Image (spheres, rainbow, N blue to C red):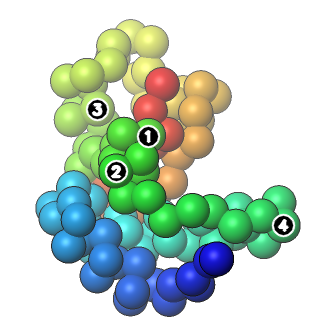
Amino acid sequence: MKITLTQSEFINKFNKIRPNHFSYHGLQCLFDYFEELDDSTETETEFDPIAICCEWAEYDSIEEFWDEYDKDDYPDVEAIQYITQVIELELGAFIILQF
């Protein structure tokens, strides 16, 4: 049995289980990403906030990303896009599928 979530339901349920893991805008963009993925692959993504938190990470800036990854290997977001999925947010923030 599957339940379809609206964007608001996705954000509210996510924040009840894993509050403050992603920004509000980040959750909006993740929801849109999963919706587009479902449409393009004709599948349904399972709502699993714990798995999403393990697989995806949000960074406020490239400098914050460099705290975990090598600056020389990934000097900008474009270099990261060659390695993994990147969801660009506003003001230099972005979400990546962790690698």
Which of the two discs, 1 and 2, sits closer to the camera? 2
Which of the two discs, 2 and 4, sits closer to the camera? 2
Ranked by sequence position, the earlier of labels 1 and 2 is 2
Q: Quadrant of residue 44?
A: bottom right
Instruction: State the separation of the CA atoms marked 2 and 3.
Output: 21 Å
Outermost residue on the left side: it is 20
Ranked by sequence position, the earlier of labels 3 and 1 is 1
Q: Is residue 17 visible?
A: yes
Image location (x, y in percent) of residue 78: 55, 35
Give left or right: position of 1 versus 22: right
- Badge 4 amino acid: Glu
Image location (x, y in percent) of residue 80: 51, 30
- Callout 1: helix, strand or loop? helix
Q: Which mark is residue 42?
A: 4
Q: Which mark is residue 50?
A: 2
- Residues at badges 2 and 4 in contact (C-beta under 8 Å)? no
Instruction: State the separation of the CA atoms marked 1 and 2.
Output: 9 Å
Q: Quadrant of residue 28?
A: bottom left
- 34 up-or-down from 88: above or below: below
| Quadrant assignment for the N terminus | bottom right
The residue labelled by disc 1 is: 55
- 20 up-or-down from 11: above or below: above
Which of the two discs, 3 and 1, sits closer to the camera? 1
The residue labelled by disc 3 is: 65
- 30 up-or-down from 85: above or below: below
